[in-house]
Image (tube, helix red, strand yellow):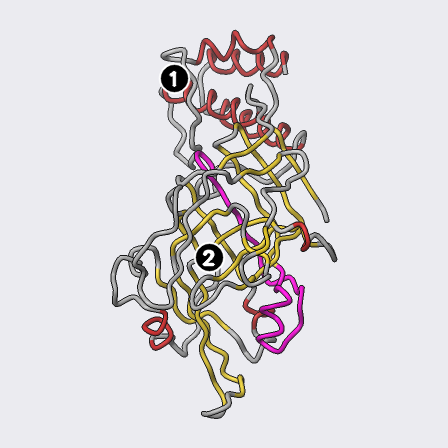
Amino acid sequence: MLINRVVIAEIKPSIQKIIQELLVDREFKFMKIKPIRYSRSWNSCRRILLGSLLCVSSCANAAVLNASADGTFTMHLDRNVLSTYSGYFLSAVWNSEDSDYTNPSNTGEYFSAHIGTTEISSLNQIFNLTDIGNDPGNQPSQRFVKATSANFTIDSETLQGVDAVIGPYGNRIAGAQIGTLGVQGFYAPFWQTACCGLGGGLVNGDFSVFYDSTRQTAGRSGWLLANNIYFTMAVYDFANLQLIYSDADNWRLSGDLWMSPENGSMLRGEILNDVGDFCLGTGGFAGCGQLSQVPLPAASLLFMSGLLGLMTQLGAKSRNLFYSIRKNL
């Protein structure tokens, strides 16, 4: 199992004074950095520089990462690998609103009946996280949306979580989990059905993320994504994890999605194939697009080169600031 952790390091005292000059209200709040056009306004550039500095270095040193309902789970599936499973491809997606579990019509049977036979993009599939608390009651038939557990944690050193426990039927179930909202429909044109010849559909959704130490074998991390429509079953194992965090409530866990033994066997194909990648982001990392995955110190060099390019658009005052920062890094 490959683990790659990027802890956003402490600010060097020698550049704290420079950062203070960039602060407007002397209070730092985590900033979501989005692509923007260069501005010749010093006030605008001051905010850009401050946000860039603190994305590379921060004074947070969390050891245990917490659950947060303010976040997203994103997956990118490799259609070429999926197609090896009887031509399997993504054909329908219902987001959190379309799959609303408070609507009694949104049953598992409803989604199964509305699986298309035309392929759609399997990239950038985004699922919102559920609220922290107890599993919702009075859900439609075949629906088992999971709440995010209050005791969910990730150890930033070992990347382990609250371990799975033995359930009432002797199977291992989540000891703590992050729940998601949304449903996917897949179609396999070459699937041999028992009743109707070739072609069949499958729904996955109401996903949950949890840790099971018994799955920490064959390169797997122990983390998995489970389907909870009709029944709970691991669909993908997580591997080759990378972690970035600024504090206990703002973090991003990403890595590869491997076809689980349960799902691969059901689809009559290979198991533990790399079928895509995922990103679980909370707080300021929700959406997973705020920071590069370039590890430090390479990220620091990338930051400096980008900052140099920005300085070419600015006046003498900002260029002097850049040289001061470079000198003190």
Specify the amino acid type for callout 1: Trp
The tag earlier along the polypeptide, 1 or 2, is 1
Residue 74 in the magenta stretch? The answer is: no
Q: Nearer the viewer, residue 96 or 16?
A: 96
Specify the amino acid type for callout 2: Phe
Q: Quadrant of the C terminus?
A: top right
Q: Are marks 1 and 2 in contact (CB under 8 Å)?
A: no
Q: Residue at x 60, y 32 (%)?
A: 302
Q: Is residue 86 above or below residue 100?
A: below
Q: Is residue 118 above or below residue 22?
A: below
Q: In the shown orientation, is residue 16 left or right of residue 142?
A: right
Q: Residue at x 41, y 11 (%)?
A: 26
Residue 115, quarter of picture: bottom left
Q: Nearer the viewer, residue 283 or 297?
A: 283
Looking at the rendered structure, the number of numbered marks drawn on it comes to 2
Q: Nearer the viewer, residue 300 or 133?
A: 133
Residue 328: x %, y % from top left: 63, 12
Residue 272 in the magenta stretch? The answer is: yes
Q: How would you rate the neighbour count of disc 1 (Cα within 10 Å): few for under 14, some for 14-19, many for 20 or more?
A: some
Residue 101, quarter of picture: bottom left
Residue 288: x %, y % from top left: 48, 43
Q: Nearer the viewer, residue 177 or 327?
A: 177
Residue 296: x %, y % from top left: 66, 31
The region drawn magenta spans 258-285
User: What residue would you read off at disc 1?
Assistant: 42
Q: CA distance from mark 1 to mark 2?
A: 46 Å
- Element type at marker 1? helix
- Element type at marker 2? loop
Q: Is residue 205 among the parts visible in the rendering?
A: yes
Q: Is residue 100 among the parts visible in the rendering?
A: no
User: What residue would you read off at disc 2?
Assistant: 207
